[in-house]
Amino acid sequence: MEFAVKFLDGFESFVGVNFWTMIFAWCNLLILYILMKKFLFGPIKGMIDKRQSEVDEMYTSAEEAERRAHELEAEYTERLSTAKEESEEIVRAAQRRAQLRSEEIIKEAEADADRIKERAGEEIELERIRAVNEIKDEVSEMAISIAEAVIERDISEEEHRSLIDSFIDQMGDEK
Amino acid sequence: MDLSINGPKEFITLYIGNFELPLVTQTTITLIITTVALIILSLVVYKNVKKRPGGFQVIVEKLVTMLYDMVEETMGRHNLKFAPFIGTLFVSSFFGSILGMTGVLRSSTADLSVTMAWALVTTGLVWYHSIKAKGFGGWLKGFTEPIVVMTPMNIVSEIAQPLSMAFRHFGNMVGGSVLTALIYGALSAVTNIVFGWLPEAVLSVFPPIFQAGIPAILSIYFDVFSGFVQAFIFCLLTMVYVGTACPPPEESEQLPDAAEPSTESGD
């Protein structure tokens, strides 16, 4: 069995299949496939997919945030309008209460004034009666002294008094 | 003027008895350079892959996205797992083709051994997935459809499928290189005719000025454009064949003939 390795300058046939070259081509293709899948297609495709999913996620979250913002806006608008209504209600209630209170106060004041007036009237009446009585007494005394002086007649004081009293009564009634 | 059109150069050949095994040829060197270059490129991309891509990564990402989109469009979403393989096949073919532009190296795709090896990988994938989907008996039975008379035709088209793929790719690339070599020869002849009046000593060192320019444009067509188109066609055929062998999971029961067009369109 002859065995030799020769370095030569010949050519392979132009149209021919060399099985060794085929094996070599397969090996090259396999190695390239494994390495390029691991280091080129895999990472690049993974990165593209990752970026894609990230962008999708971003859009989703942005839409979600926008939706929430709209919700919040609507909520706050509603809350503001209810707050306004409430404040108006409060102001109205306060006004009503104040009105009621003022009316009450006026009524009380009127009532007080009436009572005071009444009492003053009563006092005036009492004063008048007292004054009338005093005047009566003075008048009767004056009358007695005048009468004593006029008629120089000594009659009993009781008689005088009853006489004058009846006179004054007549006078008071006539008034 | 000597113009010879040859196969790949043999550099180291192993002889065992009468059996000769060319260990290192121009093709194997091109294959090694392609593989190493692409691995280095992959590692560079892998090291620099960022969430916020730079200019280079944007281009790579665009290409990878195009690849995945194309695989999804041609083979369906369930076959996206083939995308890295299709991409590997494409860049191997394209880089192997344009390396022929250097003049020193020979396009790896201009060697029938390489294109045949790749075409057989496609056929192997098709057969593996057909047998996996339909069972060995079901796969054999597929040859007798639509009628039994068609059986020899189906077998021939099944064999013709890898042969046609391999020869199409090989023929296009090698045809380009042959044409380029012929035009180089013709242009050097033109140089000799136009400057033939010069003395022999001057002519032997005179630059073949007509060889500048025209072959560059032709090289762009034959190596870059043709290399791209052929790599694309090869990958597209692989996608179509493997895709029809792997129909969508829920339709595989309803459409038993789904894998049939692959055998019909193999030529």
Image (cartoon, coloured by chain):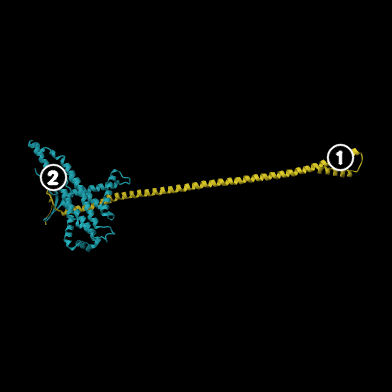
Q: Position of residue A134 (x, y in %)?
A: 81, 41
The chain ID associated with circle 2 is B
Could you say which chain is coloured yellow in the image? Answer: A
Q: Would residue A174 be seen by someone viewing this image from the given angle?
A: yes
Q: Amino acid at mark 2?
A: Ala
Residue named by callout 1? A143
Rounded to the nearest angstrom, the CA distance separating label 1 from label 2 is 178 Å
Q: Residue at left 22%, top 59%?
A: B260
Left or right, residue B145 beside residue A101: left
Q: Is A86 in front, or is A63?
A: A86
Badge 1 amino acid: Ala
Instruction: Name the residue rendered at 68%, 45% in the picture.
Output: A112
Q: Label for residue B146?
A: none
Residue with the mark numbered 2: B181
- Most extreme residue toward the right is A153
Front residue of B101 and A121: A121
Q: Chain drawn cyan, letter?
A: B
Depth order, front residue of A69/B238: A69
Q: Position of residue B11 (x, y in %)?
A: 14, 49
Image position of B142 (left or right of A60): left
